[in-house]
Image (cartoon, rainbow, N blue to C red):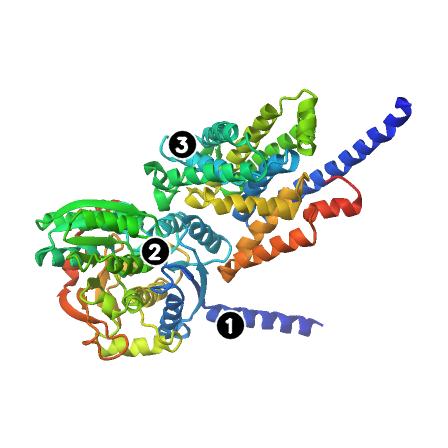
């Protein structure tokens, strides 16, 4: 009986993977062609946010933990990367690594406090921690208060590639973001990822099966924080600036919006959501404060009309995994 | 067939030369400002109006030029400002950015402008660092700076007995620079600084900061902030009975829009330094009337006037150079040509980018003295152009040492 039941399952899985690979190839092709048509700095900004949203999605989409303080990792990694590159004279690869690691360290600290609670309490704790660190960023001398850290040198990657050229910088950002993206894909399809999904579906049952869910949750939290840190560090180099905007709670809200609009718990949703939101902010900038109103309307429409998000609804309509 | 061919050829040649003779110099100017928040009243939409007037008065057609104006809101955030500037230079072919209130944004825009070799005409930002340690060969700082404000208001107050100071400082580049420059003036003139407190930008509740100021028992509470922050501090200070208790506020950067917002009853007696006042002479009044056609009921600040004058001088320099492509060349030309315009009179652009012109010490009138709307200031003294701005030797600007 087991031999009869198995093949369709395996086949279904392969079908799912095939649609994912097709989507991945299309995405990479688009991203390679894009800088010849679209302004590269805008693309790099969207890519950084795409990685940030994917990292966030790892936590909410696959473990079911809604963190409302992810700006903490994003913003602080960007500060520390900028500081390392500007003041300590780190080359870009080392500065980005330093920023990413600082995201991991902050993730361990914030995670081990926050995962003790669930639901709204978890969200509140992460928000509180993030606001505490926002205040530190506002007052600490090295962050420059309202000025931020300005004029951060992009430097030469591995001492060879001059990152002050937009196209070179774009390739660097693209490679790093795709690496992060594939890493996340690997995580959610590993046995570890299966346990995370089990925790999302029913935590007591996962515990009864003998899993130490706290440890799994912490591990996922740290991974998410680390990747958010990578995104923040890259953004500091792209804009040659680290500022308070990136640690403020609105940034945590924005990443929630990106993930929701794109599709919670889908692989490509956060990428689509990030590009959409960043494009709106860029191309609707002349409407000033109205951007926030437009974003709010989209958020409401998304929750009311297409709750699976853009990619989620698309995948549902086509009957494939995306 | 051959005839048609040669005709077509002749036509192309003709059209080609005609186009060449007429192809105007294209200039695009970006007004980057705070359009919706605490500095929108002192610059923002008013700066756009002033920019349009400058282009109109320059009459680009007569110089075979074509000038376009674009604008954007930087929301007082350095990241938003620098990414708009980058995009303007890279994609939209903007040649010069004007205004940019909020010094932290201005510093970020200055870096981008220098990198792309364009022109930055500063009017709204105040930090004297922009022409000091962080000066740039691509910037011209037109209207005012923190050194000038400190030197005007600070000196006048210490000399009339306000010799102990406590600073309430906005926590960013401008506030720090203004406090530093004023404290230096206060101590140099025999006064004493008792302490300071840093306040986040765009703060709504000043109570805890004002209590600290009250407890310091300083005679003068120096407000090293601007726009909505200054208004809030003065209003709340009046509610706390600070002015009634014998302490005085020194608004180190007060614009006419702030006085209008506070009302003469609250603001009367406030001493302030400004480089331009709409009611000084007939030229200013006539200019203000034209400006008010688009901004009814408002009064132009010195920042708005600076936007007008800096664009006028910039366009003259572009006409003289013959192209707007090389930003540094245009700024060099601006430094060579003496400035002369209806609002700020004659002056010059110094090697560090500072524009020199006289500054004025005003006192806010009492409600009884004010005869008509906008009749807010009375002149106390005039600071001549050569004393109003920081001497070049104290600049620490690398351009100055390089020029020697």
Q: CA distance from mark 1 to mark 3?
A: 56 Å
Report the residue at 70% width, 22% height from top: A209
Select label 1 or label 3 by which is in front.
3
Dot 2 crowding, Cα within 10 Å, few <14, some 14–19, many 20+: many
Instruction: For mark 1, give the secondary structure.
Output: helix
> Mark number for residue B329?
2
Q: Please name the residue shown 42% across and 34% down the image.
A: A80
**Residue B148 in which image quadrant:** bottom left
Residue A33 in view (yes/no): no
Q: Is residue B268 left or right of residue A30?
A: left
Q: Secondary structure at mark 2?
A: helix
Q: Chain of mark 3?
A: A
> Residue A84, which numbered label?
3
- The answer to whether residue A194 is above or below residue A151 is above
Q: In the rendering, at what x and y percent does residue B167 appear? A: 22, 49
The residue that label 1 is drawn on is B18
Q: Secondary structure at mark 3?
A: helix
Q: Earlier in the sequence, mark 2 or mark 1?
A: 1
Residue A185 in the image: state x and y as whole percent.
66, 32
Location of residue A243 by image quarter = top left
Chain letter for the residue marked with disc 1 in the picture: B
């Amino acid at each position: 009986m087991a031999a009869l039941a198995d093949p369709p399952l395996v086949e279904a899985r392969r079908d799912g993977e095939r649609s994912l690979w097709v989507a991945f190839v299309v995405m990479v092709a688009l991203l390679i062609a894009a800088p010849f048509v679209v302004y590269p700095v805008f693309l790099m900004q969207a890519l950084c946010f795409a990685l940030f949203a994917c990292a966030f999605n790892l936590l909410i989409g696959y473990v079911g933990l809604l963190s409302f303080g992810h700006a903490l990792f994003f913003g602080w990694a960007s500060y520390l990367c900028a500081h390392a590159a500007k003041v300590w004279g780190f080359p870009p690869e080392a500065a980005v690594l330093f920023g990413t690691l600082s995201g991991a360290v902050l993730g361990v600290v914030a995670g081990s406090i926050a995962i003790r609670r669930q639901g709204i309490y978890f969200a509140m704790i992460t928000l509180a921690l993030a606001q505490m660190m926002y205040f530190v960023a506002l007052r600490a001398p090295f962050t420059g208060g309202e000025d931020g850290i300005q004029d951060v040198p992009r430097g030469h990657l591995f001492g060879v590639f001059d990152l002050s050229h937009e196209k070179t910088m774009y390739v660097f950002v693209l490679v790093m973001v795709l690496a992060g993206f594939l890493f996340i894909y690997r995580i959610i399809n590993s046995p570890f990822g299966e346990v995370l999904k089990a925790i999302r579906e029913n935590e007591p049952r996962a515990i009864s099966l003998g899993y130490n869910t706290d440890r799994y949750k912490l591990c996922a939290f740290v991974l998410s924080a680390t990747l958010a840190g990578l995104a923040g560090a890259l953004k500091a180099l792209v804009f040659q600036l680290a500022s308070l905007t990136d640690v403020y709670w609105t940034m945590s809200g924005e990443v929630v919006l990106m993930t929701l609009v794109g599709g919670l718990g889908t692989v490509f949703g956060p990428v689509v959501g990030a590009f959409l939101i960043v494009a709106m902010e860029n191309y609707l900038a002349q409407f000033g404060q109205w951007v926030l109103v437009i974003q709010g309307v989209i958020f409401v429409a998304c929750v009311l009309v297409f709750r699976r998000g853009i990619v989620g609804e698309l995948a549902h309509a086509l009957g494939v995994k995306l | 067939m051959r005839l048609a061919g040669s005709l077509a050829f002749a036509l192309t040649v003709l059209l080609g030369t005609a186009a060449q003779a007429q192809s105007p110099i294209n200039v695009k100017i970006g007004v980057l400002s705070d359009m919706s928040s605490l500095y929108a009243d002192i610059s923002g939409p008013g700066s756009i109006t002033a920019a349009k007037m400058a282009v109109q008065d320059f009459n680009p057609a007569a110089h075979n030029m074509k000038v376009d104006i674009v604008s954007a809101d930087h929301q007082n955030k350095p990241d938003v400002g620098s990414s708009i500037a980058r995009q303007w230079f890279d994609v939209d072919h903007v040649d010069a950015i004007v205004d940019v209130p909020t010094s932290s944004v201005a510093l970020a825009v200055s870096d981008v402008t220098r990198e792309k070799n364009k022109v930055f005409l500063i009017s709204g930002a105040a930090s004297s660092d922009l022409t000091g340690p962080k000066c740039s060969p691509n910037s011209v700082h037109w209207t005012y700076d923190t050194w000038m404000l400190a030197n005007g208001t600070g000196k006048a107050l210490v000399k009339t007995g306000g010799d102990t100071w406590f600073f309430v400082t906005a926590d960013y580049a401008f506030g720090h620079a203004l406090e530093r420059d004023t404290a230096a003036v206060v101590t140099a003139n025999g006064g004493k600084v008792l302490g300071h407190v840093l306040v986040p930008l765009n703060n709504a509740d000043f109570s805890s900061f004002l209590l600290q100021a009250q407890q310091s028992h300083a005679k003068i509470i120096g407000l090293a902030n601007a726009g909505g922050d200054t208004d809030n501090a003065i209003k709340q200070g009046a509610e706390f009975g600070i002015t009634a208790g014998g302490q005085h506020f020194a608004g180190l950067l007060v614009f006419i829009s702030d006085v209008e917002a506070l009302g003469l009853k609250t603001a009367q007696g406030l001493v302030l330094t400004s480089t331009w006042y709409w009611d000084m002479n007939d030229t200013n009044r006539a200019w203000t009337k034209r400006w008010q056609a688009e901004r009814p009921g408002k009064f132009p600040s010195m920042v708005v006037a600076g936007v007008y004058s800096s664009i006028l001088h910039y366009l003259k320099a572009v006409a003289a150079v013959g192209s707007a492509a090389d930003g540094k060349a245009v700024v060099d030309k601006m430094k060579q040509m003496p400035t002369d315009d209806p609002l700020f009179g004659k002056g010059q652009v110094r090697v560090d980018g500072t524009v020199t012109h006289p500054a004025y010490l005003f006192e806010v009138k009492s409600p009884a003295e004010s005869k008509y709307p906008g009749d807010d200031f009375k002149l106390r003294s005039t600071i001549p152009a050569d004393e109003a701005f920081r001497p070049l030797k104290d600049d620490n600007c690398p351009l100055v040492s390089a020029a020697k």
